[in-house]
Amino acid sequence: MVVAWLTSLAVGLLLSGCGGDESGVTTLRFWAMGREGEVVQELVHDFEAQHPDIRVTVQQIPWSAAHEKLLTAFVGRSMPDMAQLGNTWVPEFTALDALTPLDAWVAASPAVDPADHFPGIWDTNVIEGQLYGVPWYVDTRVIYYRTDLLRQAGFDHFPRTWTGWMKAMQEVTEQGGPDRYAILLPLNEWSQPVTLALETGSALLKDHHTRGDFSGRAFAQAFDFYTHIFAEGWSPPVSNNEIANLYQEFGRGTFAMYISGPWNLGEFRRRLPAALQDSWGTAPLPGLTDARPGMSLAGGSSLVVFRTSEHQEAARKLMAFLLDPVQQIRFYELTGDLPSHREAWNDTRLANDPRAAAFRTQLEYTRATPKIPEWEQIANRIWVAVEEAVRGNKTEEEALRDLDEDVDRMLTKRRWLLEKEN
């Protein structure tokens, strides 16, 4: 009798240790990153109340450790059921065959309407024609600027074209005097030159994403515009770690423009003095013409389900809950992350915010960077080339030629695999 009881206890403990369901309750493992991983717990409590048969275990992972932890979990066959995944990571985990395709679910689900999403953001999750993630929150880049300093330079609104933008940078710099600049473009960031190249129509890579196209006409046009800003003295040739306090320098008028994402909406409100709260605004990026805003980066995070999950249906239920516009507005209030559903933007908390309006406009004009696993490595090489040209260590032509050569080397295996397939 005692032996039988001990055996039963051991089996129970073993099942418990393996994460087995208890009383018909499914335990769902969800990995979320940074601040989002902390805040989503509040939404999960309501989900569990609506779905008493599902319990969600949220693991919060710092962004700095998230990529390595996901890869380690993949190798160790210990992936969670679902996760928040940065949009630029989706191609890598798709290449590993780690993600569940979501096309059939989206087609059958009233919770997700592709037409209610921003097309450029949605496209970041489509790899070779298949959908592997659904945007959870979105971000892109717009211009933050000192409205008072532009007004002093003769501009009552932010320019809509590159030509007008150059004129504004010239006038603001001249108006500011010594040690004052029109714009801050940190040299150790790749996003600004790439964003400009999206507007000129550069594909960044060519030959089925197997070679660099940085010496091509479109990227070279954007690169020339970018380096011209430094040559004219409109931006200081510094990296972001050479700026002691970004917000303080913006408040002092050291620079009047800065390209950044939605996370800085809250930061500028908190960090700028009260006297300046009516003296800054946001604007979509200028375009080559005034027919539309310029193109910007398609960013944010998506929700994905892993192929190894034994709880696919429960994971999709949680995904549908988190994607609901009502929950997206709650998430926005808790984190400042911008909703992926257009419908959520009708909420007065966003619709009546003029600084958020620039993001709403810009989100209609975004493009995905190349959807290949090597992109982040390539992106880091771009800013090195930029810095070499700006500091005069290489000519523009040399910097772009060498960048193409470096990228071609990075993509050697990709070319070999493509040739093998053919």
Image: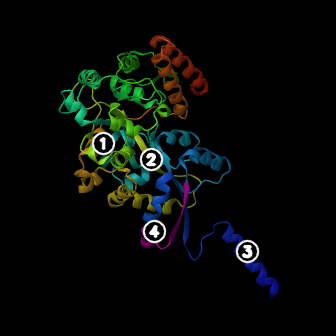
Amino acid at circle 2: Ser
Work out which quarter of the rendered image holds the N terminus and state it.
bottom right
Does 225 sit above or below residue 322? above
Amino acid at circle 3: Val
Left or right, 356 with respect to 192, comes to left
Q: In which image quadrant can residue 176 be found?
A: top left
Mark closer to the chain start, 1 or 4: 4
Q: Which mark is residue 45?
A: 4
Between the residue at mark 2 and the residue at mark 4, the CA separation in whole angstroms equals 21 Å
Q: Sort mark 3 into few (<14), some (14-19) or many (20+) by Cα contacts within 10 Å.
A: few
Left or right, 336 with respect to 35, comes to left
Amino acid at circle 4: His
Residue 339 or 368: which is nearer the viewer?
A: 339
Question: What percent of the width, then of the height, locates residue 173?
Answer: 29, 23
Left or right, 246 with respect to 345, comes to right
On the question of residue 339 being in view, the answer is no
Mark closer to the chain start, 2 or 4: 4
Q: Which residues are magenta?
A: 46-60
Work out which quarter of the rendered image holds the C terminus and state it.
top right
Question: What percent of the width, then of the height, locates residue 140?
Answer: 37, 39
Mark closer to the chain start, 2 or 3: 3
Mark whose residue sits in front, 1 or 4: 1
Mark closer to the chain start, 4 or 3: 3
The residue where tag 2 is placed is 301
The residue where tag 1 is placed is 359
Residue 382 or 314: which is nearer the viewer?
A: 382
Residue 50 located within the stretch drawn in magenta: yes
Q: Secondary structure at mark 4?
A: helix
Between the residue at mark 4 and the residue at mark 3, the CA separation in whole angstroms equals 30 Å
On the question of residue 215 being in view, the answer is yes
